[in-house]
Amino acid sequence: MSSRGLFSNRLGFILAAAGSAVGLGNIWKFPFEVGLGGGAAFVVMYLIFAFLLCYPVMITEVAIGRKTQKNPVGAFKALGYNNWKFIGILGLIAGVVILSFYNVVAGWAFGYFVEMVQGNFAVGENFGSFTSDIFKVGIYSIIFMFFTAFFVSKGVSGGIEKLAKVLMPTLIVMILALVAYSFTLPHAMEGVIYYLVPDISKIEISTIGGALRQAFFSLSLGMGALITYGSYLSKKDNIISSATFITLADVGIAFIAGLMMFPFVAFNLGGDMSPVMAGEVGGPGLIFVTLPGVFQTLGSTLGMFIGSFFFLLLSFAALTSTVSLLEVPVSYMVDEFHIPRLRAVALVASFIFLFGIPSLIGNGYSEFFTSGFNIPGSADFMSFLGKLADIMLLFGGCCIVSFAAYIWKKENLHEELAQGYDGYHASFVKTFVNFTVSYVSPILLALLFVMVLLDNFFGISVF
Ligand code: PHE
């Protein structure tokens, strides 16, 4: 086993897994989803889902990974259920799909960092020309994929863990500094109120589906990323407390990202949040369109400083996630086909980059990939992939918990969870895991999967 590598300690695992969880999903996606989903009502639903539905899935994934010390496909085989390896295969595909477009957005974040350093605030108003400048964004996404590949090629303790140990604390300090700053701006409170005071009438079925998709994506669940990271975790470590920390870190950082973003938005809108409520301001462009304008009003030196700081932060957060996305197919190639790590990284990273080209050119450059799709709600290829990934994750998550509860059997799950956690069998946590993994997570995930599927791809709203 040692040839596969292990995290050097529990902190390494926790930071790497929290690094996977905390990413564009928290800082780019969460605030705009909150904006579209009706503000605080969305936040409340998100918190409920994260702890009630997602947390048990995370525990299960890590346990399967650590038990088998294998990649997501090999894990099901190693447990003796060859027929169930389809879950792992779907996970691999989901990982490839997600990384293909995630890397494009990460490339934008990195590109914006470069623009901010040069004091080019106008890039926000010209977001469309930025994303359709195929030469520029192409280079940025190649650079980003290269960084990702570099750290994955160094292995688990030598690359991924070292990266996370430096970047995660830096990220937290950076984001807190930005929150503190955003609170000093005029109209900050109007933004905070929109974000934090729930309007129950805003909870619609789409809010529920959206909050669940967001929680799942944000916690990196349903595709085996945490099976893979769990496979490098030592038997001495406590899975439950690690998962608790990772969930809290992810939810906490998403929450703080909102706390930073809404004062910025309110400042930009002069305190009137109605364009956000009406859906006129927000969406995927929230960070890329609105923020450079905010930074500009701070004057060229301060604006340049805060702006570069922000987009560097976004790039860091993205990097610890792209690394985990690439690690999944790489660990599969290394474990199952005995391909040397470096070669596996080069192969998979190049393939995913190529697979990402439609997303790269589907943001203005190619008309077909930008607006040629007739699937409800996704005219462009990238949103189509985003929706596809969402349902794959929900389906994967539902299969993973159902498998653990009814095929692998709960006793085996509990036995794995008790390793590294002395009082586990007598604890309340055991009852909670038992109940959620058997009933709450599989049933609700199955229901929500069907709902989101109908809504995303057939335009049918169930309620
Ligand atoms: N959780 C990451 C984010 O929030 C994205 C991700 C999804 C990473 C699935 C790995 C697996 O940005």
Image: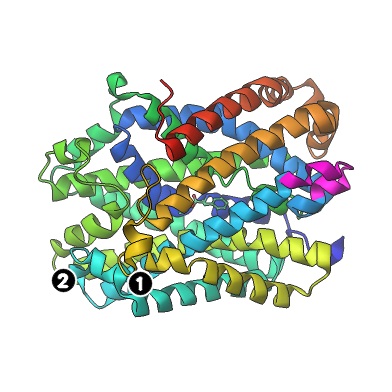
Depth order, front residue of 442/291: 442
Residue 228 badge = none
The residue depicted at 65 percent of the width and 76 percent of the height is 346
Q: Is residue 65 left or right of residue 139?
A: right
Residue 67 point in image, percent of width and height: 83, 44
Query: Which picture quadrant has residue 81?
Result: top right
Residue 201 point in image, percent of width and height: 28, 19
The residue identified by callout 2 is: 300
Depth order, front residue of 225/403: 403
435 inside magenta stretch:
no
Q: How is the image coloured?
A: rainbow
Depth order, front residue of 455/53: 455
Against 276, residue 435 (above or below) is above
Residue 111 badge = 1
The crowding category of the residue bearing disc 1, from other C-alpha atoms within 10 Å (few below 14, some 14 to 19, many at least 20), is many
Instruction: Provide the major secondary structure of the magenta segment.
Output: helix
Could you tell me which secondary element the residue under label 2 belongs to?
helix
The residue depicted at 60 percent of the width and 71 percent of the height is 351
Comes first in the chain, label 1 or label 2 = 1
Q: CA distance from mark 1 to mark 2?
A: 18 Å
**Would you say residue 333 is visible in this rendering?**
yes
Quick check: marks 1 and 2 in contact, CB under 8 Å?
no
The crowding category of the residue bearing disc 2, from other C-alpha atoms within 10 Å (few below 14, some 14 to 19, many at least 20), is some
Magenta stretch bounds: 75-86
**Would you say residue 165 is visible in this rendering?**
no
Label 1 beta carbon less than 8 Å to ligand 1: no
Q: Is residue 188 left or right of residue 234?
A: left
Against 285, residue 405 (above or below) is above
Query: Which picture quadrant has residue 242?
Result: top right
Q: Is residue 18 left or right of residue 234?
A: left
| Amino acid type, label 2 | Ser
Q: Quadrant of the N terminus?
A: bottom right
